[in-house]
Image (cartoon, rainbow, N blue to C red):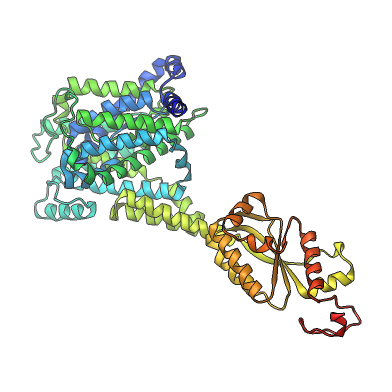
Amino acid sequence: MKVLSGQAVARLTALLPGRLDLAEMRRDPRRDLLAGLTVAIVALPLALGFGVSSGLGAEAGLATAVVAGALAAVFGGSNLQVSGPTGAMTVVLVPIVAEHGPSGVLTVGLVAGVMLVALALLRAGKYMQYVPAPVVEGFTLGIACVIGLQQIPNALGVPKPEGDRVLVVTWRALAEFAKNPNWTAVALALAVAAVMLIGARRRPAIPFSILAVIVATVVAQMAGLDAAKPIGDLPSGLPAPSLAFLDPGALGSLLAPAVAVAALAALESLLSASVADGMTVGQQHDPDRELFGQGLANIAAPLFGGVPATGAIARTAVNVRTGAGSRLAALVHAAILAAIVFAAAPLVSRIPLAALAGVLLATAIRMVEVGSLRAMARATRSDALILVLTAVATPALDLVYAVIIGLVVAGALALRTVAKQARLDQVPLDRGDHSAEEHALLAEHIVAYRVDGPLFFAAAHRFLLELAEVADVRVVILRMSRVTTIDATGALVLKDAVEKLNRRGIVVMTSGIRSGQRQVLDSLGALELLRLEGREYATTPEAIQGARTHLECVGVIPLLPTQESRPLGVETEETVG
C-alpha cells in the first residue's frame, strides 16, 4: 500500500507546475503581456457568442473564459495554450441544455472535469496520437458547419426555435424569417463577418473581430435599431462559487453526457496543444499535464456558472502568432477578461446578438482549411471516406458519435490494409543443403509454405482457406520466422488447420517460431499437436531433415531417376523392404 501511495503522489507531483514554468514566465514578460492583451480582445466576442449559443447566456461564456482560462494556463501542459468556451463544446452542450437545463450542464462540466483528472493520472494523454488525421479534419469541418448553422437564428434576428438538432432548428429559423423578415439583423451579421474575413486577409495582425463588434454596437445604438436585439444585462463581476446546482439524484442520467464532454475536451485540448507545438520551434506540450489542467478548469468553471471549457485552437493560434513565449500570456488574457467583466459589463450588454452571430460565422468559415481538406481527400480513397463520414455525421448526429464513427471506419480500413500484408507463399526448398536424391524426395512428397506478416483475426480465415487447399503431399512445412504478430484467432486457426491436415494424413511441421508468438500458440494448444510427435523445429533445414526421416519411417522412399512414378501410399516389395 505504501508503494502504491508513493507512486500516486509521485505521479500527481509530476502533473503540478514547477520552477521551469516560473522561469519561462520571467523570460520576456513584455512580449507575453502584449500577446495576452491581443488574445483577450479576440476572445471577448467569442466568449460572449459561445455563451449565448450554449443556452446559458453571455455571462456563462465570460465566466468560463476567466476561470477556466486562468486555471488551464497555470496547470495545463502547454506554455501557449489558451482555454475557454469553444464552438465544438457548444455543439455538445445544446442538447444537454434542452434535456436537463442549465443545472444539468454545470453538473456535466463538473463530472467531466473529474474524469479528465482521472485520465491524466492514468497517463492517457499519449493515446491522442492514434487519432487519424482524416478524423480530425472531418471533425473540424463538421464543427465549422454546426457553428455556422447555430448562428442562423441570431443572424436572422428571430427567436431561437425549439429543438436540440441544429439542422431542425436552422430550418425552423428560416421558416420564421420567411414569415417576418428582419433585414437589419441580417445586415449587421453579414457586415461583421465580411469585415473579419476581408480584414484578416489584408491585415492579419489587427483584431478586426472586436473592431467590427464595436462599430456594429455604436451604429445600432445611434440609429436606434430596435430590430438589433442586444445581449442584455450582465452581472458586474463573477458570482460567488457554489454547488447549489448539483443534484446527486441526477448524476446517473448525466453520466453519458459527461463522458461525451470529457472526451471532447480531451480531444480538442490535445489537438490544440499539438497545433501550438507545430507553429513554434522547441515547444512540446505534456499531454497528461494538459488533461490535468483542463480537468481542474472544468471542475472550477461550473462553480462560477461557467460552461465546460477546452483548449481553443483559434485563440491559441493568435497567442502564438503575436509572440507569446510562456503561459503568462494566457493568464493575462484571463485577467483582462475579468477586468472587463467587473468594469465594462453595462457596455458589453449592449452588443447586438446579430453582431456576435457575425463573429461566429466568420470564425466557422476560417476554421475550414480548404487546402488541407483537398490534400486529404486526394491522398487515398480511405482517407476521403473517413473525412466525409466524420464531417457528415457531426451535424447529422453529434460530435462524439462522429468521432466514434470516424475511428471505427479508420480502424476497419487499417485492419483491412494490414490483413492484406499477410501472405502464405509456397516456396522452393533449398537445393544446396540436399543431394539430388533427397531433393527428388522433397519435391514429390513435401511442400513448404512461408507465412509472412501478421497472422491475426483479420487475416486468419484467409490463411486457413489457402492452407486447406494443399493436396497430393505427405508433409507440410510452415516457415514461421517472418510472422510479425499472432493473436488468439490466428493461433486457433493454425491449430484448426493442423488438425484438418492431420485428418487427411498430412503431417505438419513448423520452423522459426519466435518466443513471443510461442506463448500465444502454446496457451491455446496450437503447439501441443506439434510437440507430441516432435514436429516443431528451430530452423527450416532441421524441419526438412525431420520430414525426410518421417517419410522414411512410414515407408516412403525417394524416387530415383530410373524408377517409375507410383502413386503415394502404394506399397510394393521394394518399399516394404
Pick the front one: 227 or 94:
94
Residue 496 visible in this rendered orientation of the protein: yes
Examine the image and state in which quarter residue 321 appears. top left
Examine the image and state in which quarter residue 194 appears. top left
Q: Residue 563 at x, y = what percent?
A: 89, 83
Quarter of the image with the C terminus in it:
bottom right
Tell me if residue 318 comes above or below residue 562 in the rendering.
above
Pick the front one: 555 or 101:
555
What residue occupies the far right of the structure in this picture?
A: 562
Tell me if residue 376 comes above or below residue 300 in the rendering.
below
Pick the front one: 157 or 58:
58
Examine the image and state in which quarter residue 17 appears. top left
Q: Residue 245 at x, y = what percent?
A: 16, 34
Q: Is residue 131 left or right of residue 41?
A: right
Quarter of the image with the N terminus in it:
top left
> In the image, what residue occupies the spot 71% across and 56% down?
512
Q: Residue 497 at x, y = what percent?
A: 61, 68
Q: Residue 369 at x, y = what percent?
A: 41, 45
Q: Is residue 282 left or right of residue 396?
A: right
> In the image, what residue occupies the spot 81% across and 76% down?
556
Q: Is residue 165 left or right of residue 15?
A: left
Pick the front one: 121 or 390:
121
> In the image, what residue occupies the spot 57% across and 60% down?
490
Tell me if residue 573 comes above or below residue 165 in the rendering.
below
Residue 62 visible in this rendered orientation of the protein: no
